[in-house]
Image: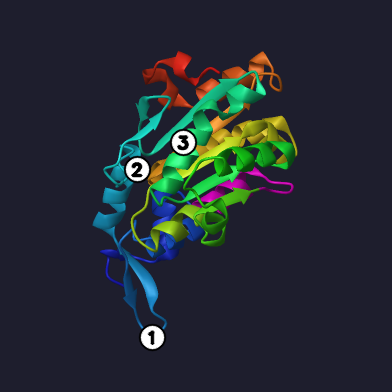
Amino acid sequence: MSQELRNTAEAARFLRVSQASIRRWSDAGLLPSHRVGRRRERRFEQSDLVEFLNRTEKQAVPAPALAIHVGGLPIPVPGHVATFYSSDAGRMRLTVPFLVEGLRSGQPCFLVATDEVLDGYMEAIRSHNGLDLNRAVADGQFSAVGFDGATVHRAVSHWEGKFADILSHGPALIRHVGEMACVRRMFPSEAEMLRFEQAYDVMCRRFPVAAICQYDAREFDGLAMLSVLKAHPDLFERRLATFLN
């Protein structure tokens, strides 16, 4: 094999990720590859791997030009912010307009919520005139997602696969909202969920994703909130009061 080309396993070792990640990025067109031999195996040029690594470290992911705003403030794409609320009304103030704007723009939207929280979101979104939520669900534009016994690895792999699959069909700006009190119940412990937040912040930088993690101040203590702030560095350059509800 030419020294300029690496196979999937070698590319994974070079980028310090799993082989599944390499295949997803290749399928999504994020990482250029060549197909060789009868089995059409993937091969990667060293220069492409270096460029991809540099692009990831600089958090430079191609994204549509449309600006994404939360509460009137622009957020980066890729971007991963946290919001904090202390009432049921506060829960909906930022995220429902965020999701509605995405649905009106034809962008894929994900919501992680369960039970009465999910029901409240569905009712609030349906109340907007001219928006056919049932059609968006049927077309796969809007997805309500849940996990059962999630781990950091499983959850990160799930979202990485979802985002790569979307991009394999063409450029898209992806919106993602997680109701973290619901998400916490999907993990074996709060500590595992908070580790996932840190891992997600690294992973999502490779995709044109605008993500909002919603924290109910009635459900999390001060130590957890400190960990949350550390896992959302995009908050530090913005007016924090915007994200308090």
Q: In which quarter of the image is residue 70?
A: top left
Q: Which numbered mark, 3 or 1, is in the foreground of this view?
A: 3
Q: Is residue 178 magenta?
A: no
* Residue behind mark 1: 38
Picture residue at 39% right of the left edge, 52% below the top = 14
Q: Where is residue 9 in the image (x, y as percent from the top left)?
A: 45, 62
Closer to the N terminus: mark 2 or mark 1? 1
Q: In this view, does 11 lie above or below 74?
A: below
Instruction: Report the amino acid beneath label 3.
Output: Phe
What is the three-letter code of the residue carrying label 1? Arg
Find the distance from the CA under tag 3 to the CA under tag 1.
47 Å
Residue 78 placement, left or right of 151: left
Instruction: Please name the residue that numbered disc 2 is placed on.
Output: 56
Main secondary-structure element of the magenta-colored stretch: helix
**Residue 137 figure quarter:** bottom right
Camera sees residue 187: no
Q: Position of residue 64 (x, y in %)?
A: 29, 46
Residue 227 in which image quadrant: top right
Can you say whether 133 is above or below 209 in the image? below
Q: Which of 30 and 145 is in front in this view?
A: 145
Bounds of the magenta segment: 146-160
What secondary structure is marked by label 2? helix
- Residue visible at 52% across and 52% down in the picture: 132
Q: Is residue 58 left or right of residue 10?
A: left
**Residue appearing at x 27%, y 65% in the figure:** 3
Q: Name the residue under label 3.
A: 98
Separation of disc 2 and disc 3 at Cα? 26 Å
Tell me if residue 157 is in the magenta stretch. yes
**Quick one: SS at disc 3?**
helix
